[in-house]
Amino acid sequence: MSPLFWLLILPFIGGLAALLDGRSKTRSALWALAGLTGALLSAAKPVFMVLVSGNNIAAALPWSMVAGPLELVLDPLSAFFLLPVVVLGPLFALYGGAYMRHYRQEGHWHGIHWFFYNLLAVGMILVLLTRNGLSFMVAWEVMSLAPFFLVLFHDREKTARHAAWIYLVAGHLGGILLLLFFLLLGTSGHSLDFVTFQPQLLSPGLRHLLFALAFIGFGVKAGILPVHVWLPEAHPAAPSHVSAYMSGVMIKMGIYGILRSIQLLGGPVFAWGMVLVLAGVSSGVLGVLFALAQHDLKRLLAYHSVENIGIILLGLGVGMIGISLGRPVVAVFGLAGGLLHVLNHSIFKGMLFLGAGSIQQQCTSLEIDELGGLKKRMPITALCFLIGSAAICGLPPLNGFISEFLIYFGAFQGQTVASAAAAWPLLLTLAGLALIGGLAAACFVKACGIIFLGSPRSTPAAKAGETGPAMYLPMLVLAAACCGIGLAAPYFFDLVRYPLAVLLPASLSPSPPFVGAVGRLTIISLVGGGVIILSLGTALIRFFLLRQRTVCRQPTWGCGYLYPDAARMQYTASSFARSITLFFDTILHSRVEGAVPGEFFPARIGLHSSTPDPLTRFCFTPLFSGIAKFLGLLRWMQHGRVQLYILYIVATLFLLLTALAGGWL
Amino acid sequence: MSLVTVLLTLSLAPLMPGVINRSKAVFAGRRGAPLLQPYFDLGRLLQKGVVYSDVSSGMVQLVPVVNVALFLCCILLVPLGSLPALVHFQGDFVLLAYLMGLGRFVTMLGALDTGSSFEGMGASREAFFAALAEPAFFLAMAGLAKMTGALSLTGMLQQITVEHWLHAAPSLLLILVALFLVFLAENARIPVDDPTTHLELTMIHEVMILDHSGPDLAMIEYAAALKIWLMAAIITSVLVPSGSSPLWLPFFLLLMVILGVLVGLVESSMARLRLIRVPQLLIGAGVFAGLALFLEFAQ
């Protein structure tokens, strides 16, 4: 039996076993973990082979689908996106097993949770392997529906129900567009098999329409602005390992979908690249700005997913522009940067969400302004979170820098050779990436600094302790991966060689720019290693210098006010981000409730600020309440009398038959 | 020969703050501290002990170590006058900018490590202003690359010839102005930051390192001097004509001194901007660089 079959069936069996054995928290988690580990083991060889050789692996399953047997194909692009699905799935499940033991309330049937967790993995695997529009949509729906149940784990909380509802609506509105996309594309070859699509027969206008459908439809899943609104709701509500899996891996299926649909549409045109760049800049800049204004760690991380999807889109957009201009260097660097950032983001964002989960478990709160001083109390979590933060800001010598460097260079090289009309999206990419990088650094200094450094701002934070090894080991593995990819960049760069070739037209050879990229990445990794070695050397010198000196510890200077509470005098997350959020208030529309001291002897007062998503607030809420109001007019038809419902059915049938008989249909 | 860049930078970098302070004193009608004062300061600090905040948890100790290490690495990436950088490759300026970003990241975290609200203020401002300075720097680099066709810092800075000055003087000047504004912001000089005020409330960089002392402070000051030197070298290298004339070195050093005096002149002639005006200055720098690019594409 083909390994692709095991890849699909093992996590499903694991999930079923977890469901049947669901009374036991530990055993159901272990079943799920076993299933996912099985998937990892059966995927290891084919994924490795495909990424190293560039050849496809195919298997036909003897299951009868509507349109014939289920055919699975693992090509380099699928294999590249499969990598985080199968590697991070078991890692997060390991963490989740320990994390979920925390929830002891009655009525939590853990088996259901793990069943849907594995079902999410199965859905993603099938999305990546299938090559038929119908089975793709089935897999897509499985993948979209499973997280609904995962987000709904805390179903007694109103926020979780609301979040799951928004997720469901967003996912399905996206799904409708995708259905249209495949149906319209299917008309070109009179079949839903991907190989039969003939995009060259379509008119340019229809191709643009199809691209728009795919871009928005997949964009909802990826979390592209302005259809990102489900992310900041769903991620905070879900258990942390689920947030990690969704944010690190599932939203990348949207990116996969966009790439695959561009390939199905016969390669990109310049305008599509421009659309990707514009969407990337707006998602990136606004995503990080919204993140800066948040006080809840998981909401903040969710907005950073929007930002990083923006960076990925920038890379892919630069690549698409390079392809349409016939510039191999621009195309290869842009696409490679975008693809590598997919992998990198899944690593550090997954780790950051796990870190958030550990903090939540230890401090019972994710409100950044109630935490503080956790580095002393949770040293391993703090170290991992710090490394992840530096990586997500794109700082060398970590992995985020590698992918951002590739995107920068693609855009940079492109703007020197392109005409003015083609260069402006590339210049926008340069300036946008730089601004995103700077603001992301501000946001993560805020998150890390306020949460892990300083003094604790609440009693739970002061009493926190390190988590168990099942929770910090996965984080350590991911932190090591962040450093490893940064310090051995040329080797990991090899992973994107063939996925990238899938997207390039035959006329562009990826080899010469590829060799140049490897050379540059080698130097970057060496310099990164140099920074580490020099740091160690400097630390040694410093150590010897201070050996005979007096080194003492004193309280931080508090302007003479050490009493009543130095911890409460610290800078908070809100005050740290205040200057930035104030500057961008025309975009953010932060709400401040409370009073400022006005009298001579101020009494106890409170101040609360919040920044709900402006797009939800000013765009989607009015839109959907308008629709609801309009549809409310039809409510008289829904009265609950079954006889009349049957009458509706009969009347509809009669009309349809009449229409058919009359030859109108 | 390339080792010369390293030795020159290592030995002469602390001279830059000395030149700036001396010229400020002269403009104010004072005699001022000796030019070598920064060296004396470093020597004195290296002999002292250290005091740490009892709140801090190791991040404070990381600041001097990482900053020195990565500016030592940055020396390898920056060309001096006619000398190419020891390590140069296409796109190296991205690495340079992000290495400096790493230094800033660690410094800001170190500032928050003491739990002092002053240092939090400094870190918050630094984060904001740096984020706005970054696009200006990259657009300026894009302008230089478009002009010269080179993609490495060494290539861009050394391939600017008299021809470029004759044909594209406005763009070059705009790029220089943008780079100078970024230089002022990154190195915490007036009009963005005032390193000499007695009030922590109004400072940015100095307040972030308020709780550092002894050898740690010496290392941070030395790293800051290296940063001034390297960023000044980028600006002056635009002006040093390429070629192997032996006169380049005195000319280059003269330009560095002139730049230092210019900074002193700016500091003597104007006050620090209000903090809410600084973003406008930095966005202005980005606009200058963008305008330079516009002119180049219009040609």
Image: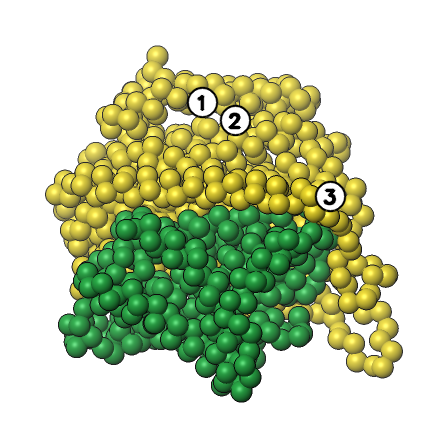
Chain colours: A yellow, B green
Distance in Å between CA atoms under marks 3 and 2: 26 Å
Q: Are marks 3 and 2 on the same chain?
A: yes
Q: Residue at x 41, y 37 (%)?
A: A487
Distance in Å between CA atoms under marks 3 and 1: 33 Å
| Callouts 3 and 2 close, C-beta under 8 Å | no
Query: Chain for mark 2?
Result: A
For label 3, the crowd category at 10 Å Cα-Cα, with few meaning under 14, some 14 to 19 and many 20 or more, is many
For label 2, the crowd category at 10 Å Cα-Cα, with few meaning under 14, some 14 to 19 and many 20 or more, is many
Q: Residue at x 17, y 77 (%)?
A: B166
Residue B203, above or below A53: below
The mark nearer the N terminus, 3 or 1, is 1
| Callouts 2 and 1 close, C-beta under 8 Å | yes
Residue placed most toward the observer, A125 or A308 = A308
Q: Amino acid at mark 3?
A: Cys
The circle drawn on residue A113 is none
The circle drawn on residue A40 is 1
Judging from the image, what secondary structure is the residue with disc 2 in?
helix
| Callouts 3 and 1 close, C-beta under 8 Å | no
Judging from the image, what secondary structure is the residue with disc 1 in?
helix
Q: Residue at x 32, y 19 (%)?
A: A61
Q: Are marks 2 and 1 on the same chain?
A: yes
Residue A478 appears in view: yes
Query: Chain for mark 1?
Result: A
Q: Which residue is mark 2?
A: A90
